[in-house]
Image: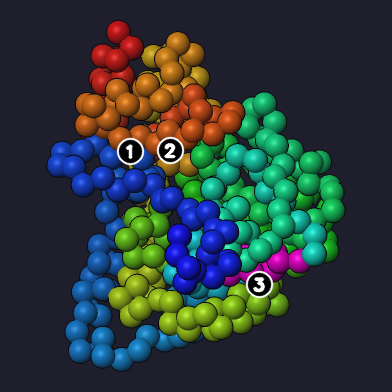
Amino acid sequence: MSRYWSDTVRTLTPYVPGEQPKIANLVKLNTNENPYGPSPEAIAAMQAELGDSLRLYPDPTGERLKQAVARFFGIEARNVFVGNGSDEVLAHAFLGLLKHDRPVLFPDITYSFYPVYCGLYRIDYRTVPLDDGFRIRPDDYRQSNGGIVFPNPNAPTGVLLGLDAVDRIAAENPDSVVVVDEAYVDFGGTAIPTAVSLIANRPNLLVVQTLSKSRSLAGLRVGYAIGQPDLIEALERVKDSFNSYPLDRLAQAGAVAAMDDREYFEATRRSVMQARDRLQQDLSALGFVVLPSAANFVFARHPKKDGAALSLALRERGIVVRHFKLPRIDQFLRITVGTGEQCATLIAALKEILG
């Protein structure tokens, strides 16, 4: 606390990002990074950009990246906004599209940075409880609101809401923007269950995605939003009132190549899904209750072992997973899907801990 702080800063409860421990030989399964590296084409594109051109500012509009995203989804570039990671894209959406007289609605179990953004921008919000299976109930969102935002698949549970239910929420709230945060959607099945297919008929729907997970570029910080042009314009207006150059030249070059390399994208996401399914089976065989996951992580608890104690026991063996000290989920562990070797190390450690 300082006498120089503004009143706004005094009231903030900042977001605490996932731990990035600096420990040698650590099995790191706590922040949902992809176990596979980025597309070789993306790395080559960034290496090609690394040179004298860095003396020049990047394209403030990110037009080449917008076109690459549009190509991937078969839409127009005017329906795309690009920014510095999906977190910043979401922050712009909170300020530009969700700040109204009525409260924003989001699930009671979700990203902890949603209420952080509301605190920063002084947005009233109301949490909506998930059901006993940690699922979103569309009927619960039929109430007065200034906007709706939810992850799909949800985080940290990994549970997927079907597209028919997403469409219903948007249809039943025509006067509010509905933001669907799809950071993990590419791991949702052979056919990707993205809500991008709904935006043509839902002018109030905004879909936010990232290159951090399925395209293995968490260290690059690139995200984007897809929606009707008037929603995109709102995000552009916020961006250009904050930072007109959120994506540097290396990030734009690498992101364009990653979006265009469909073959590598398909191969790695399918490998992650196969590894996730094996990990779920192995955890179930050890007696864990495992929620159905459509993400690159699993959410599991053991009925005979405390969640915090399990997390600590794994850490003592050089394995880091995520444990949340929150109501309803304090017995669960969120476990990132790692390489086959990492998952085998995890299962062996759990067998030892559980006896």
- Residue 82 seen in render: yes
Residue at image x 58%, y 44%?
110
The residue drawn where x is 58% and y is 66% is 8
Q: Main secondary structure of the magenta part?
A: helix
Which of 147 and 33 lies nearest the eye of the viewer?
Answer: 147
Numbered badge on residue 96: 3
Residue 297, numbered circle: 2
- Secondary element under disc 3, as helix, strand or loop, is helix
Q: Amino acid at mark 2?
A: Phe
CA–CA distance in space, label 1 to label 3: 34 Å
What segment carries the magenta color? 92-100
Number of marks in picture:
3
Give the residue pinned by disc 1: 29
Of the two numbered discs 2 and 3 on the same chain, state the one appearing first in sequence. Answer: 3
Point 66% across, 54% down: residue: 149
Residue 104 lies left or right of residue 55; in this view the side is right
- Disc on res. 273: none
Question: Label 3 is placed on what type of residue?
Answer: Gly
Please say whether residue 70 is one of the residues in the magenta stretch.
Answer: no
